[in-house]
Image: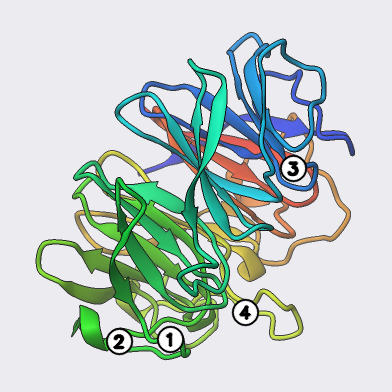
Amino acid sequence: MEWRIKRIFNFTENKSWEQGFVKFGFHGKRGTQYFLDYNEHWLGCITAEDEFIWTAGAADKGLSRNHIPFEAKYPHYIAELPDGSLLVSSNGTNEVFKIRPDKKSAELFINTKRIGLKDIGNCVYDEQGYIWVNEIEGCRVWKFNLAGEPVLTLGNGHPGFQGETVPFEAVQFNWIYDMRLGPDANMYVLDSKNFSVRRINVNQGTVSTVVGTGEPGYSGDGELAHTATLGSNPDEYFDGPFSISLDEEGNIFIGDTYNHVVRMVDHSTRQISTIVGKHHAESNQRNNPLETDPYKINLPKICSMDYHAGCLFIPDWSDDLIVVEKRR
């Protein structure tokens, strides 16, 4: 599978969104775009014409007449629920909120501090009526019902790794930076300080390693993904890869942050390859919007990727957004 550059955006320091795409956000299943301003503590729903339908959070930027106030701090992830409401993980307050845009209301859904959850990353709805939440430093994954009650916990809170398939009660992780739902209805966990991707088989009650050996490096392209290594920078507080995403076929995309590239695991061959980026990135060097070679893209620090409708959205902390699409 080949990828080509669709568009490159050089965002300004204030992260303006008037260029057609949001820098940091997610697409809903029907293409709805949600924008999160992590540092300014607000989020919103944006149209293709760059107009906000509504905004929500601690800060009202005056961008929409429909602002829903609630005490979000560092909003991290948005999940759509079947009834039209949204779940938002608030990393800074360690809570999950439910937003009802039609009613212009927000309410606390999960007070994770109350149940001893150390820190919160994503909140992912699995379409079977459950919400999955990952702890980052806490090294655990939680499963909640739609009443916000915990029904399952994976991990014992201590860093660990198993390359083989293990039952839920035995699994350990080491700092989980990202977690996404796959088209196979299983959860995919970016086990970052283990430099791996783990698959939670929700029906079999097992966790298996699908990418990585547990050791850092930059190897494995053209080979089976479980033999590959992913990048590391032990001098950084957040070591290891930052982001994963999956497409409708089950291909896995890894933002291999410290190797400065995007890797893809083919769902049919299980082989891994580099599809975007150059291994030796240049700090403070913006990408040329006219660049056409995906292997010349400069990605000093890839953050939260998103896939939608044949396109992969690759944000970098440098305020560049790279959009690549599958070559037809």
Q: CA distance from mark 2 to mark 3?
A: 38 Å
Q: CA distance from mark 1 to mark 2?
A: 7 Å
Q: CA distance from mark 4 to mark 2?
A: 18 Å
Q: Which mark is residue 41?
A: 3
Q: CA distance from mark 3 to mark 1?
A: 34 Å
Residue 152 is situated, as x and y percent measured from the top left of the image, at 27, 69
Q: Earlier in the sequence, mark 2 or mark 3?
A: 3
Depicted 27 relative to depicted 123: above or below: above
Name the amino acid type tagged 4: Ser
Mark 2 is surrounded, within 10 Å at the Cα level, by few (under 14), some (14 to 19) or many (20 or more) other residues, namely some
Mark 4 is surrounded, within 10 Å at the Cα level, by few (under 14), some (14 to 19) or many (20 or more) other residues, namely many
- Judged from the image, the secondary structure of the residue bearing numbered disc 3 is loop
Q: Earlier in the sequence, mark 4 or mark 2?
A: 2
Depicted 120 relative to depicted 100: above or below: below
Residue 19 is situated, as x and y percent measured from the top left of the image, at 73, 19
Foreground mark, 3 or 1, reads 3
The answer to whether one can see residue 245 in this image is: no
Q: Earlier in the sequence, mark 4 or mark 1?
A: 1
Q: Which residue position holds label 2?
A: 163
Q: Which mark is residue 232?
A: 4
> Badges 4 and 3: C-beta atoms under 8 Å apart?
no
> Badges 1 and 2: C-beta atoms under 8 Å apart?
yes
Q: Residue at x 83, y 45 (%)?
A: 286
Q: Which residue position holds label 1?
A: 214
Foreground mark, 2 or 3, reads 3
Q: Earlier in the sequence, mark 1 or mark 2?
A: 2
> Badges 4 and 1: C-beta atoms under 8 Å apart?
no
Q: Residue at x 38, y 69 (%)?
A: 141
